[in-house]
Image (cartoon, rainbow, N blue to C red):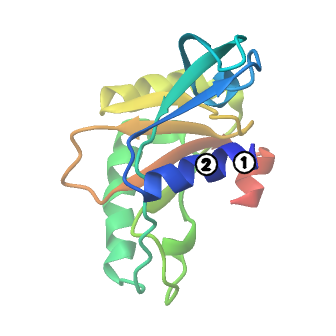
Amino acid sequence: EKLIDAACDVARSQGYSRIYIMTGEIGLYEKYGFEKQGNLKTLYDTEDQLFSKELKPKKKVVVVPYDATWKQSFIDIRNELADALGEQAESIEHVGSTSVEGLSAKPIIDIDVVIKDRTMLDKVIEALEKIGYRHEGDQGIPGREAFKYEDKEYLMKHHLYVCAEDANELKRH
């Protein structure tokens, strides 16, 4: 896996947008996002498979000095969520690095909506969908349900999660 990542990084750094690999291995490269392009005869008259993968630019992480407006940005988002969720939310919490006064952070507000238990999740999903959020599942982290949104330019960029009050992930946040 590290060798595949390194090859992709080198190709990306050289300005390539796609990488090709010829191999006799079956199934290995598909596991890492490569698509089979076909079969090729080698110089030794054997047949290998040709795989390729699109190389997307790596995202750059931007960390900025603490901004006192993050507190008000959270309040604006919390108010919209509270209006939509009412008593379904036990609490709406500002978590992550933007919640720590004086700490540099990625300028993205992290929010946990805390619910009594998972039996409330369907109603919460429905309420959040009405105000433009889309449920994305737990994204591989049990106990934390993620939500995406569109058309909320009036609010600061944020990540929204819903957790039951007894969820381990809530305690970790």
Q: In which quarter of the image is the N terminus?
A: top right
Residue 1 makes an appearance in the image: yes
At label 1, which amino acid type do we have?
A: Leu
Give the left or right position of residue 46, taking residue 19 as reference.
right
Residue 162: x and y in percent read 58, 41
Q: How far is the residue under mark 2 from the one under mark 1?
A: 6 Å
At label 2, which amino acid type do we have?
A: Ala
Instruction: Identify which residue, 75 or 54, lies in the foreground.
Output: 54
Image point 50% across, 31% down: which residue?
A: 53
Identify residue for label 1: 3
Q: Residue 7 carries which label?
A: 2
Q: Residue 77 carries which label?
A: none
Residue 124 makes an appearance in the image: no
Image point 60% across, 27% down: which residue?
A: 121
Crowd rating for badge 1 (residues with CA inside 10 Å; few <14, some 14–19, many 20+)? few
Res 44 quadrant in image = top right
Q: Quadrant of the C terminus?
A: bottom right
Image point 44% across, 76% down: which residue?
A: 63
In this rendering, the answer to whether 25 lies above or below 150 is: above
Residue 55: x and y in percent read 45, 41
Q: Is mark 1 on a helix, strand or loop?
A: helix
Give the left or right position of residue 141, taking residue 9 as reference.
right
Residue 133: x and y in percent read 37, 33
Q: Is mark 2 on a helix, strand or loop?
A: helix
